[in-house]
Amino acid sequence: MHMEETNKPNRKLTTASGRPYAEHENTQSVGKRGPLLLQDFVLHEKMAHFNRERIPERVVHAKGTGAYGTLRVTHDITKYTKAKIFGKIGNECKIFLRFSTVGGEKGSADSERDPRGFALRMYTEDGNWDIVGNNTPVFFIKDPKKFSDFIHTQKRDPRTNLKSPTMMWDFWSLNPESLHQVMILMSDRGTPYSYRHMDGFGSHTFSMINAENERVWVKFHFKTQQGIKNFTGPEADAMRTQDMDHSQRDLVDAIDNGEFPKWTVKIQVMTEEEARTFKWNPFDLTKVWPHAEFPLIEVGEIELNQVPKNYFAHVEQAAFAPTNQIDGIGFSPDRMLQGRILSYPDAARHRLGVNYQQIPVNACPFMTENYHRDGAMRVNDNGEDGPNYFPNSFGDVVPDESYKEPAQELESSTADWFDRNEGEGDNDHYSQPGDLYRKAMTDEGRQFLISNIVGAMSGISGPKREKIINLQLCHWFRADIGLGMAIASGLGIDMAKAMPARHEA
């Protein structure tokens, strides 16, 4: 304890309403051994609060860590966006960044083979801006209707309550669009050494609008300055037995030691005309934009330099949503992004309550004005005596037309349940995974990938085992024949016998 702290007067112990009390450890009773009295309200308050200490954990991204820091603009991109934060080189704003695993529960291990969440909030003068991404540029599915089904396969079997490789591979084998992300997951990128040693991605396609109301499509990249560092499969398995909180500990220790982690912020830009002629759907979350065609443009730098003083108050109660956009940044026809616009705020209202944006970590630090009123856990002035409706003749809060986005020309006037794979290039689920395997991986990386896939697919069981394996092998073969052969060999499959089964599948 610091010397100056010893002279501070003691603070009184109080109830939540502020009433001081003395008996914190003993409940009022009838005699030393008699029954307890209902009137000891401190007992009720302590137990009632304790019973509610655990808010519902996130359905996905349940386990994570986070820190505060700074975004600093280093390059001029005003020709793409009128966002005030990018208005001048040197501009800065406070940020909060939460890392997480995706499929595990809150008590799961940090080194599990899993994508990692990379959720970034920037507290700008035009409001909070959230980019809710991952450490991968793509995802398993391209339509949000599939999301709950996919996540169910990553959780627990409804009968055994165990994780099920059969469920996972059954879903992936029936959804070839998953192949790109599955290949990344099964490589050593699926087991990062720590949150500091991985890249982040906005993953979705977003839009930027400049001062002339011209729109371009963009993707966000966050390149780690600590260098990429991954566990091998066996190393990740070993870490689960040594320290289940390895990534949490690594981040906290680094910041506490003054080793502030940094990422370089970059964007890819695609014009609306380029989007119309791009080989693949540019709004498909299972595809990337090749860097050779759409090079990375440096924007700025983020640094994490402050561990929250209380994990629950800041990290657990943080609620990110892609609906948190600012003037000059917008959405796109990305189907998964459109789905998350609905689901993320809805999940936060369920988990934290309708007034979750008043919690300090979620609250905009600048002025906010709206007509929201009431609801559970309202902690601000609730609009005081101002009108709670619009339009009205009494208040001075009005819409600012200068923030209106330009109209977007739609390519069709037909509304239907379009197949997500029926467009030109949309059914190509194999070119990019094949290029990733052949061109972006080292020989050692390919060997680790094959070993990880074989190990994971070996867990498939049950009466549909052969069908699931053969169908998934079809996808690996279509991505790369050598990859398919290596996996089949690792699984002990005689391809001469398996070929008829593959065709039947």
Image (cartoon, rainbow, N blue to C red):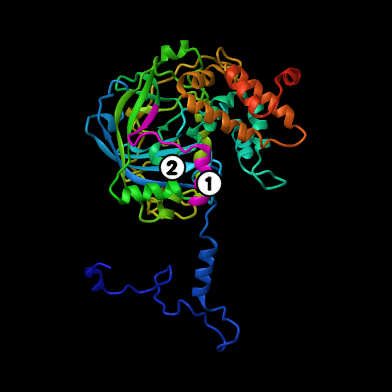
Point 40% across, 28% down: residue:
330
Q: How many marks?
A: 2
Quarter-wise, where is residue 143 in the image?
Answer: top right
Residue 182 visible in the displayed image: yes
Q: Which of 214/29 is in front? A: 29
**Which dot, 1 or 2, sits closer to the camera?**
2
Amino acid beneath label 1:
Arg
Kind of element beneath mark 1: loop
Magenta segment includes 229: yes
Q: Amino acid at mark 2?
A: Phe
Q: Callout 1: 10 Å neighbours few (<14), some, many (20+)? A: some
- For the point 51% across and 60% down, the residue is 53
Front in this rendered view, residue 59 or 99: 99
Residue under pointer 1 = 58
The x and y percentages for residue 256 are 31, 51
Residue topped by disc 2? 99
